[in-house]
Image (cartoon, rainbow, N blue to C red):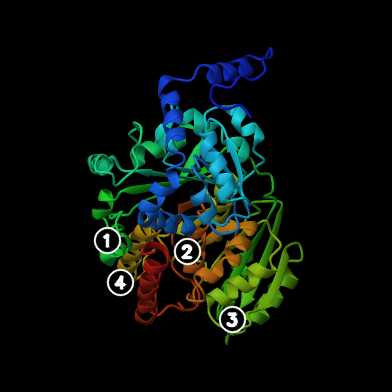
Amino acid sequence: MAELGEQVPQDNDEGARAVVADVLAPTPRKAAILAHADRFADARAFWRDKAGYFHDEDERYLRFLIPPGSRVLEIGCGIGDTLAALAPSYGVGIDISSKQVAIARDRHPGLTFIAGDAEDPATFLAVSGPFDVILVLDTIGSLDDCQRFIEQLHRLCTRETRLVIGYFSHLWYPLLKAAEAIGLRMPQPEQNVLSPSDLRNLAGLADFDPVKSEQRLLSPLRLFGLGRFANRFLSVLPGLRALSLRHYLVARAMRPTDDDVRSATVVIPARNERGNIEPAVQRLAAFCPDIEIIFIEGHSKDGTYEEMERVRAAYPGHDIKLMRQPGKGKADAVFTAFDAARGDVLMILDADLTMPPEQLPKFFEALRSGKGEFINGSRLVYPMDDGAMRFLNLIANKTFSYLFSWLLNQRYTDTLCGTKVLRRSDYLRLKAGKAYFGDFDPFGDFDLIFGASKLNLKTIDLPIRYAARSYGETQISRFRHGWMLLKMVVFAFFKIKAI
């Protein structure tokens, strides 16, 4: 492994010669950063313990973003304590200082550590990817060319890999320098000035798509318990969040291509929807070569299941399966059908057909093209049919949309549209992590939304034209279910925001 200033063999390839030139001729700034890291290597554990509360708060949020058991690469790992705190199944740390790497190996023998310059492509030749998460904490501030650094991470990524960058707000720069001057913080070399928008821009230039960003941590000090209160409840509030010390970006690599989307399952939960069963089949376009339709009936009293049997027999050219849900509620119906589905893509179509089946090809294409990983229908963009949604329902939907956009750090214009689309592989990951939220949602919409957020999936709102119901009556009670939804907002605040 070539470290900074170490010679590597020459060859005739121009790219290799460029790499060698980078290694042999480090910039004065890079040489100073290496000298600083080596000088403070032995004292790094002392300074980390001194700032223990800050690191505890930082790692608390990182553990929310990065599930235990993930394959994690940390670039700029120092002595490896943060990487170890994430409990990876396979953890690799890279640091420019061979002295810090030696300490990291002694402290965390179960992890792999590599000494090398993160901007030197040769460094990554010793790294065996891909990874679930690539973590860059503060190191982004020491780089000479942030865009080129991010670009070279693609070879270690799959579609599911997430790049997590953590950095500090330069609004805090005078306070941090003052803390260094009085011995409360380890001295730091000059750092790049990067705002959250700068990080999003750099990621985009390097073909990484920003998924979400967050600002947290108003207090790096415990302050007799007040620091925890400020960091948990105040630093996430609109307005105050801009004053936070820490900001984080989660992004996904856009270069990996997937050819694993070849089939789809359309799940149609139905309760007392006899008049909509045949139109659902008739109006469903052949948007991919292999479409499975699963009707799942929920204890109807109008002959819905018998109509499903008739329609299946009348359309032998369609792959139609029938199920009766074992429990109650839309969530039970949807997840029962998802568990039985065989399609690469899972799609929900409400049997009331207020979301026109003709719109499903757009959902499929948005996912297949890679533009999004969790496609959420939005009824609140285009004008609706008369009577499609009552006024109080409209106000409630818009209110919940604003709240959830803030809670999840991704834009939602409509959280309650029944049509949601995701890969089956992502559903299985979501299901595996469902214990974090538990069974709290009888509708299923928020199970999927919260689960997609926890997986850091890229969410896309896809506008649809919401139609009036032509058969049957709505199953939603404005006030009873509205109160349940409000409780879910509070639940989400404590599970997603105030952590």
Residue 488 in view: yes
Q: CA distance from mark 3 to mark 1?
A: 43 Å
Front one among 460 and 266: 460
Name the residue at 60% across, 69% down: 268
Give the mark toward the camera: 2 or 3.
Answer: 2
Give the mark toward the camera: 4 or 2.
Answer: 2
Q: Are marks 4 and 2 in contact (CB under 8 Å)?
A: no
Q: CA distance from mark 2 to mark 1?
A: 22 Å
Give the mark toward the camera: 3 or 1.
Answer: 1
Up/down of 1 relative to 466, above or below:
above
At numbered mark 2, what does the secondary structure look like: helix, strand or loop?
helix
Up/down of 480 relative to 261, above or below:
below
Mark 3: which amino acid? Gly
Residue tagged by mark 3? Answer: 298
Up/down of 316 relative to 482, above or below:
above
Residue tagged by mark 4? Answer: 392
Name the residue at 44% across, 37% down: 139
Name the residue at 29% across, 47% down: 184
Mark 4: which amino acid? Leu
Name the image quarter holding the N terminus: top right
Task: Pinpoint residue 377: horizontal percent, then vertical percent.
Answer: 47, 58
Residue tagged by mark 2? Answer: 450
| Label whose residue precedes the other's in the sequence (2 or 3) | 3
Badge 4: how crowded within 10 Å, few (<14), some, or many (20+)? Answer: few
| Label whose residue precedes the other's in the sequence (3 or 4) | 3
Badge 3: how crowded within 10 Å, few (<14), some, or many (20+)? Answer: many
Badge 2: how crowded within 10 Å, few (<14), some, or many (20+)? Answer: many
